[in-house]
Amino acid sequence: MAFDPDAKLSDVLASGYDLNNQLQALLSRPLDSRGQELAMAFSQELSRVFLVSLSMLNSNSSVAPEVRTGNSSGVSTPAKEKRARSDNGGVVTPTKKSREEGIIRKEFTPSPHKDGYQWRKYGQKKIQNCNFSRYYFKCNRHRRCEAKKKVQQQDAGPPMFEVTYVNEHTCHELRASDDDAAAAAARMASPWTTSRRHALAGAVDTARGHGHGAGSAEENEAMVSCLAAVVSGSVPPPPSSGWPPAPEASASDPDAAGRSATVADDEAMMTMTMMVDDTGFSWDPWWSLCPVEEAASGPQLVVMNPANHHRDDMHMDKDDAGGFADTVWPEHTCGAWRRA
DNA sequence: GACATTTGACCAAC
DNA sequence: GTTGGTCAAATGTC
């Protein structure tokens, strides 16, 4: 979705309204994997709409910074990239040379982790003429998936990351073929009934860490409820079935699971979208909703990294970068991430 | 013990 | 020789 640099806030919000209508239409019927991808795409665009709208409000301008300038950091970039970015809301269309190198997409985003996939960091490199290290990630959803991404924080201005995606994800096919093999093995092992085989497939799915693969009607309903609530500005308590799983809340704060809250930024939206990625509604392992102390403005949700929730060297500041709790990643870890 | 992350070393391209 | 990208052993976390 492209945002016209001359667009007004009302136009951007109107486009968000349209997106929401399309998402609701999509969610009104059972979702197959394609539908989930579409819902994910709509949701991401909605996040972008919110981001742009908030940027407009914060800057008291009709144009979001990254849209207005193409590069708010001041780092010199090729004119082509600037043009592409200003035309495409932060997404840079790859050149022919880039495609030959396997680069399929470039994005400038304050939230480099928000793409619905699970990534494993495999490298970090200090880049010449850059204040921040470049981080290298591989897709972690399947060992043989060749998708990678590079994350480079821009030197100046508000936290903004250049995310370069390399190679298409093949984890969908790889996982599907794995699941087929597992199901075939189960059929060979014993002459169970169809329903029992389905139960086994579900168990296999669960054991593989994405236990909501096809999604029951109840789960789908909960999904629709969550997304609709987020879009409308409030998050309902999780369904009594315990879905979605909230390890933080259930393990350390049982009451938190049922605590109603107001979505304060686009992070909660994205966390919801993380649940509908094509892994089958799984929670992103890095980022999950974590209830925090009530702010003056009322209960809020911010996103924290559960793996680092207890660490002193990782901190989240909801005031950073215009109030986006996630935009500290990985900027605030410079130095802190490295061993002393 | 399994898995994820970190980081120095290595390699290829320029 | 310099630089960016990747590997893999060491280390950390659960």
Image (spheres, coloured by chain):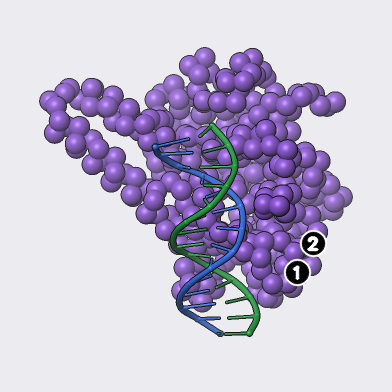
Chain colours: A purple, B blue, C green
Judge whether A129 appears above or below A139 on screen.
Answer: below
Where residue A50 sits, quadrant-wise, is top right
Q: Nearer the viewer, residue B12 or B2?
A: B2
Give the chain letter at badge 1.
A
Q: Badge 1, how many Cα within 10 Å: few under 14, some, many 20+? A: few
Are dots 2 and 1 in contact, CB under 8 Å? yes
Left/right placement of residue A120 relative to residue A17 reads left
Judge whether A97 appears above or below A265 on screen.
Answer: below
What's the amino acid at mark 1?
Answer: Val
| Pointers 2 and 1 within a single chain | yes
Q: Is residue A290 visible?
A: yes
Q: Secondary structure at mark 1?
A: loop
Residue at image location 46% in from the left, 48% down from the top: A140
Q: Is residue A50 visible?
A: no
Instruction: Return the residue at label 1.
Output: A75
Per the rendering, the mark at residue A325 is none
Residue at image location 67% in from the left, 33% down from the top: A310
What's the amino acid at mark 2?
Answer: Ala
Instruction: Return the residue at label 2.
Output: A156
